[in-house]
Image (tube, rainbow, N blue to C red):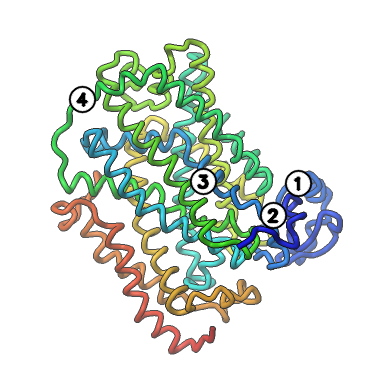
Amino acid sequence: MSDNHPHEKNSVTDLEKDAASTSDLSVVIPGDKHGWLSHPIARSLLSWGVEERGTVPVPEEERVDTQYYKIFFVWFSMNFNILSFSTGTLGPIAFGLGLRDSCLTILFFNILACALPAYLNTWGPQTGMRQMIQSRYSFGYFGIIIPAILNLIGLCGFNILNGILGGQALASVSSNMSWDVGIVIIFVIALLVSFMGYRVLNWYERVSWFPVLIAFLVALGVSGKNLYNAQPAEPATAATILSFASVIAGFVITYSAMASDFTMYYSPNVRRSRIFWYAYLGYIVPIVLLECLGAAAVLAAPNVPSWTEGYGTDGNVGGLLEAMLSPVGNFGKFLTVLLSLSVTANIACTLYSICFNFQVMIPAMSKVPRYVFSIVGTVIALPLSIAGAHKFYTALTNFLSLIGYWASAYGAILLVEHHYFRKGDFSTYNHAIWNVPGRLPWGAAAITAVIMSFALIIPCMNQIWYQGPIGITSGDIGFEIAFPLAGLLYFPLRKLELKYQNTQY
């Protein structure tokens, strides 16, 4: 399908405007019954290009962005950072896997896990809705509050981990800078980008990956020979591979709950396969490459004294990267600074999505400007990053293994609702009812399906903090069980709900 569109000339304009335009700021928009746009500060922010739109769906005539390649760079830059590198180190560090087994697990399970969020990216241009607003059409107006809370916890958790990593890396280049100061610098930069919204965010994601690429290429060029010195590992077992796989899946599958936040301004005329492959490649290429590099580096570290010293006993990933770049002297320190800033691309996008989850969790908050919640998200994550800076690996393993379970069940319910009950028809996502509780599904079927699925998920867990009776033998198969089980449970529960609610699509 051609990318030409009658509104293409507007695709580089301020697509972030709400129902009001910056030229008529006195207009009252949905969720703005008190006309806050008339406030001088709000008028100034909008005139500077700050995105105001929160959870209000984008009408079809305003979905005019045809620069579809931008979604590749959004996900590529979000994942082309030292958090992906550090996640790969968990294979050897937390689960005792060798390089071959770590890399094969990383490759295979990312091939599977990246498909779900990439597919949900394709819904944004068709519905013009934020991901959590779309989810109201399965979970209901009030039922979606539970996934929104879980997603908020996950998004804040990612920001905490990214803040720790970025702060560690930034502090590693100077003995006069503490981790705490480094963390603060990282969050301030990310907040500025997130605060501005869609247009600035897309620009930043298009350019932020290139300096990171240079830094990693130099690291490979000057220290790559040491990666062949990886220590031999014990033979892998199914239990350790599947447990590491649940961490890998938890890293990427949770993007499902924010997928369409970045595609809702795109023209609905775009081929859905085009959006899918842009998003899929944006996930899988940086994640697989950097996770494998992280596994190789941490296995080689004990055989390279400078790497061992940089990595330390606290698992300082930033110190390890600084040691890998140390052969090029001060230029290596400069590149380490660039690597530390790589996490800002992820934190900025995550803060952006956090805004909408707050507004879904507390519907009355939809009257509050989107960018206010970027500040709230920063205020929450910043002190927790500082507090948890010296417990990074424990936090990373526990966090990533836990969040994948609910996200897997969540994705299955959305797919069953869309393809079976709505027959794949996007016109059934009626904009007129997005905030009308009585006309949306009750959500009882979706919530019950998720809760009931955990009756089997919990026994199938096998993590450092908990070992279920099935998981201790088979390895962690919780997220693999969550997806089909939640989907199967949703069929009869949703049929029962429709029988009593009598909703017509």
What's the amino acid at mark 3?
Trp
Are there few (<14), some (14-19), or many (20+) residues within 10 Å of tag 3? Answer: many
Tell me which label, 1 or 2, sits earlier in the chain: 1
Foreground label between 1 and 2: 1
Q: Which labelled disc corresponds to residue 32?
A: none
Q: Can residue 281 be seen in this view?
A: yes
Q: In this view, does 317 lie above or below 37?
A: above
User: Regarding mark 1 in the picture, which secondary structure is present there?
Assistant: loop
Q: For residue 75, which numbered disc appears in the image? A: 3
Residue of label 4: 231
- Tell me what residue is drawn at x 45 percent, y 89 percent: 500
Residue 80 location, x and y as percent?
48, 37
Of callouts 2 and 4, which one flags the residue occurring earlier in the amino acid sequence? 4
How far separated are the C-alphas under marks 3 and 1? Answer: 23 Å
Label 4 amino acid? Gln
Q: Quarter of the image holding residue 86?
A: top left
What's the CA distance linking mark 2 and mark 4?
53 Å
Could you tell which of marks 3 and 4 lies nearer the N-terminus? Answer: 3
Where is residue 142? Give x, y as percent: 51, 71
Which quarter of the rendered picture does the N terminus lie within?
Answer: bottom right
Secondary structure state at the residue bearing disc 3: helix
Three-letter code, disc 2: Pro
Residue corresponding to mark 1:
49
**Label 2, label 3: how far apart the Cα atoms are:** 25 Å
Q: What is the CA distance from the residue labelled 1 to the residue labelled 2?
A: 14 Å
